[in-house]
Image (spheres, coloured by chain):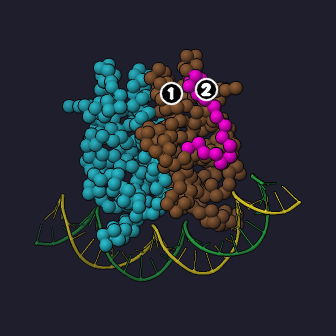
Chain colours: A cyan, B brown, C green, D yellow
Amino acid sequence: MKDITPLVQHIEKIIPLDDEARQALAAKVTSRKIRRRQYLLQEGDVCRHYNFVLNGCLRMYLVDEKGTEHVLQFATEGGWIADIGSLHTDQPSHFFIDALEPAEVLRIAKEDLIDLYVKHPAFDRYFRVLTENAFVGMQQRVMQNISSTAETRYLHFLEKYPHLFNRIPLVQIASFIGVTPEFLSKIRRNLMS
Amino acid sequence: MKDITPLVQHIEKIIPLDDEARQALAAKVTSRKIRRRQYLLQEGDVCRHYNFVLNGCLRMYLVDEKGTEHVLQFATEGGWIADIGSLHTDQPSHFFIDALEPAEVLRIAKEDLIDLYVKHPAFDRYFRVLTENAFVGMQQRVMQNISSTAETRYLHFLEKYPHLFNRIPLVQIASFIGVTPEFLSKIRRNLMS
DNA sequence: CCTGACCCTTAACCTACCTTAAGGTTTTTT
DNA sequence: AAAAAACCTTAAGGTAGGTTAAGGGTCAGG
């Protein structure tokens, strides 16, 4: 019923796990199904789990004072999603996480993860590398927001996430790159001519 | 001549080091002085070292096609600075790192760091936590760029980096928050009235 | 087959921010 | 001490992108 093979494979691309570590992981992880539009995290709640996506598509976003949504992250098969800030500090999150498509995740609670870190340093290594990669991605995004035009950001998005382009609504992509859907529509028209 | 106490103290705020780890670290780390405006990294070079700042002030920035500089990060006492993307992939960096004030850093080469990781898992832990915190910071910055006005971003900057406000030129702050110095000047005037 | 919830586009008008250019002050270098 | 470089401000005019409003297409459910 619960198959953590995809997760183990993902980890072993970075560092091999011995049997003991693999079993410890299996014991801590639980699987969960999320329906379309169902929340995995809501603003004001403390984020208590890391989530590894087995299939489907999730998003993490912020809602500003005007009620506008701003997407911080998408996560599909093989990706992780959580509000790490909230998870670490036990402070209420400012974000929502929900499903754009029905999804299935493996989740692991913060305390269990700490336990894994202590007993199996391989997990420290794995999450260090994982976070370093995520950090570099965020850095590139900051650079683009500061230095590029919306059109350039859109083209970069298509290059970097080709599998998302015809999988999620345009309005979500607009929100991710930081423009209104109307303006993104205009950008696309300009690109075609 | 080489005193790594500030670095050890910084690490031990996160995880204690045994004598052996401390000595291994001391053996790998070298100190270096940087004059004002001197480069620690130039675009096109591969970043080979992590740098821990003992004193002074450094910045990492990108120069776009038009020749405009965009600041990604400042680093002062107790901060780390490096192009982690380049360091990891051995690809040439797109960034420059230079000194806004004369500075002194402790640097450690990538290979030596890997060696430390293998022999002392405590370093995996330390850099995992370090990177997680940096990641959260970048995430907040992305959110602000997407959802806030320049004035709000400026106020947040003052809140988050009060020690930098009257230490670095205005033009650098403008570059960091993603506006022109002229416009930041206007923002300040509006804030005073 | 019809209805309603999304989803995408177009267009007119508006605003936050950029560009260019100039002048004054402070800091660094010679 | 002078010259040069860096720094900060002001203001006029321009542009990228936002806002509002409307219309049409698609698809799931009744």
Q: Residue B112 carries which label?
A: 1
Q: In the rendered image of this protein, does residue A149 appear above or below residue B42?
A: below
Is A52 or A44 nearer to us in this picture? A52
The answer to whether residue A83 is visible is: no
Mark 1 neighbour density, 10 Å: few (under 14) some (14–19) many (20 or more)? some
Instruction: Residue at 42%, 35% (x, y): give it.
Output: A129
Residue A47 is one of the magenta-drawn residues:
no
Which chain is disc 2 placed on?
A: B
Which residues are drawn in magenta? B25-41
Judged from the image, the secondary structure of the residue bearing numbered disc 1 is helix
Q: In this view, does C13 lie to the left or right of A80?
A: right
Q: Which mark is residue B8?
A: 2
Instruction: Residue at 53%, 40% (x, y): give it.
Output: B82
Residue A126: where, in percent of width, then height? 39, 31
Quadrant of the rendered image containing residue A22:
top left
Quadrant of the rendered image containing residue A33:
top left
Q: Which amino acid does label 2 sit on?
A: Val
Q: In the rendered image of this protein, does residue A67 appear above or below residue A42?
A: below
Q: What residue type is labelled 1?
A: Asp
Q: In this view, does A34 lie to the left or right of B64?
A: left
